[in-house]
Amino acid sequence: MRKRFRAGDGVIAVACLTLGVGSLAQAQTQASTPSPVPNAVQKGRAMAKHASGTFEVELNPQPPEDKAEGSTLGRLSIDKQFHGDLEATSKGQMLTAMTEVKGSAGYVAIERVTGTRQGRSGSFVLQHSGTLTKSEPEQSITVVPDSGTGQLVGLAGKMTVTITDGKHLYDFDYTLPTTP
């Protein structure tokens, strides 16, 4: 039987990292997959923009990896729904490492986000890297270069996720070429 966990359940410290313990995680989205525009170049200047809102996330542990002395490796699937300036869903995979030291862990993740931002639809991929060093979080969530499809071709940026009063929030600073 497959167990479903939500961030905040304390399932894996690293999973919480990804989902916004302090300011350690990021959000992604995916709804319906639009037709990719391979090697498309959009003309126009890239304008700096900001998006923010809320999201829900569901983590599903996958079969466990080996436990070695000093650390435990794990793998989870990620499903998110974004609301606010970005209306989207995402699907992804996360790899985690927990140590025997409480509050120290690490993770990497890849998510494909599909949805709409300011009337422009498409998808893009987010790359996560995070660590907890004795409960001190550090994160990096970045759009994978040239991963934008549809009307999001040329998208670049970084996302930050926080949890405030149990609510998951995202802030997304990005650039997107203007239309020709």
Image (tube, rainbow, N blue to C red):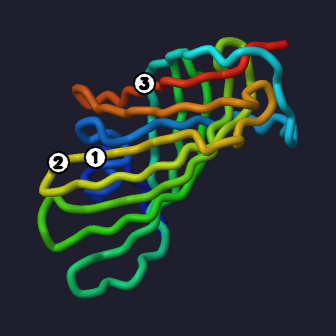
Determine which of the numbered discs, if any, sits on residue 24 in the image. Answer: none
Q: Nearer the viewer, residue 151 or 2?
A: 151
Vertically, is 2 above or below 119?
Answer: below
Q: Earlier in the sequence, mark 1 or mark 3?
A: 1
Which quadrant of the structure image shows residue 124? top right
Which quadrant of the structure image shows residue 75? bottom left
Q: Earlier in the sequence, mark 3 or mark 2?
A: 2
- Badge 2, how many Cα within 10 Å: few under 14, some, many 20+? few
CA separation in Å, label 1 and label 3:
16 Å
Disc 3 secondary structure class: strand
What residue is shown with label 1? Answer: 138
User: Do the CB atoms of the residues marked 2 and 1 lie less than 8 Å apart?
Assistant: yes
CA separation in Å, label 3 and label 2:
20 Å
- Residue 178 lies left or right of residue 99; in this view the side is right
Disc 2 secondary structure class: strand
User: Do the CB atoms of the residues marked 1 and 3 lie less than 8 Å apart?
Assistant: no
Tell me residue 7's x, y (percent). Answer: 34, 45
- Going by the numbered disc 3, the residue's amino acid type is Asp
Q: Quadrant of the C terminus?
A: top right
Picture residue at 28% right of the left edge, 44% below the top: 8
Determine which of the numbered discs, if any, sits on residue 171 in the image. Answer: 3
- Residue 66 lies left or right of residue 132; in this view the side is right
